[in-house]
Amino acid sequence: MRDQFSRFTILGAGLVLALSISVSNLRAESTPPGQQGQACGAPSPIDDGWEISSPDSVGMDGAQLCTTAARLEQQATAVHSVVVIRHGKLVFEQYFPGYDQPWGQTDGQYEFTATTKHDMRSATKSVTSLLVGIAIDRKLIAGVDEPVLKFFPDTIAVRQPGWDAITLRHLLTMSSGIKWDEALAWTDPKNDGPHLVTELDPLKYVLSRPVAAPPDKLWTYNGGGTELLGNIIEQVSKKSLEAFAREALFQPLGIADFEWKAYKNGKIAAAAGLRLRPRDAAKIGQLVLNRGQWHGQQVVSADWIAQSIAPRFQAVGYFGGTLFYGYQWWMGRSLAGGKEIKWVGAFGWGGQRIFIVPELDLVMMATAAQYGQPKEGLAAIDILSNIVIPSVRDAH
């Protein structure tokens, strides 16, 4: 925070203090539009289930957190929000206006606040994984070793050799071995991702893909497998994915304002279609941090959380191969103060990130519009590693 004071003038024996204060400079330099009049990063009370506290009360350096906006400005990023939770309390949030490409809306400049929903993109996959776990907890699905084709008996005509060996676990870990490539340009006809949008029957398209390797041998990023998982949830629950998510996950978390978008073909996008308020997305992180509990209620079993965030594959080709992958969750680490700090993450295209740091009892959520940028997503990990984690002043 920068304060500007006029010089002191001493006249005779009396001291006359002439102060010229710029109100805008009394606020933290990093306070974005919409939060003026508040302490830097002070969360707004909006009755959404979060207990609000100050950073200092949970062992964090509030002044250091307040350098977030300045660091983002130096890097010319397109970050829209940063939300920080510690010890289950919301202690810091900032929102920044900017360009966005929201699903189903016009591309352009938008204002973002605590009540603005934002695309989660592929962070949706991690939520779909939680829903699979809930379905297993409820015995709607026997377990992760159920064969995928059990749920698609009418696809004999399009099945390729090798599909009989693929289970739900292989879809969850993206190790099914089916031939799939989402790393190409969206306009490249060899990119499988756009087919989920354009095919009249995207599930049939996924099930018709050839098997390039035996299951468990090759990790390949694959949103098509997540779409199959979403459809399986619909089958066993006899509800739409949105309705099941609302009843089984969002209502217990107090998440009422959400959208789950569908592709142009009408199929709900289990891999990418969720829109949430950042504070509500942070609840997903807190749920995982609490081993499936929210305010004392076991929403998803602790066993499923443990299975989901156990490293199972090296995510080769993503961020230099330094990340691991579980059941639709990423695992990585940050270097802070000369120490490696492990975290779990939900990642979405454009820089959507939910970070869970178990050893520090910490959650950070960020949204952005870094779609297709060379440094997509790096702003969030920079803030986590160089501001949020170092701001922790105690290890408990």
Image (spheres, rainbow, N blue to C red):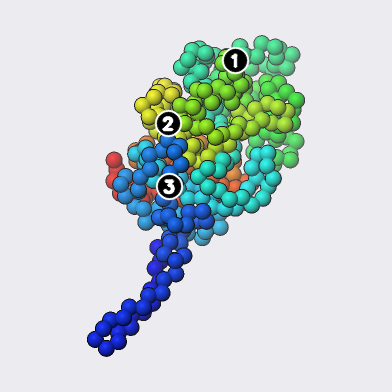
Quadrant of the frame with the N terminus: bottom left
Q: Is residue 392 left or right of residue 140?
A: left
Q: Give the residue at mark 2.
A: 287
Residue shown at the point (56%, 40%) measured from the top left: 117
Taking 168 as reference, is 370 above or below it?
below
Residue that label 3 marks: 43
Q: Residue at x 54, y 45 (%)?
A: 367
Task: Point out which mark residue 238 bears.
Answer: 1
Lateral position of residue 285 relative to residue 209, left or right: left
User: Viewer-proximal residue, 80 or 331?
Assistant: 80
Q: Position of residue 244 (x, y in %)?
A: 55, 22
In the displayed structure, does residue 209 sit left or right of residue 96?
A: right
Dot 2 falls on a residue whose secondary structure is: helix
Q: Amino acid at mark 3?
A: Pro
Q: CA distance from mark 3 to mark 1?
A: 39 Å
Residue 395 occupies quadrant: top left
Q: Is residue 137 visible?
A: yes
Q: Nearer the viewer, residue 86 or 335?
A: 86
Q: Secondary structure at mark 1?
A: loop
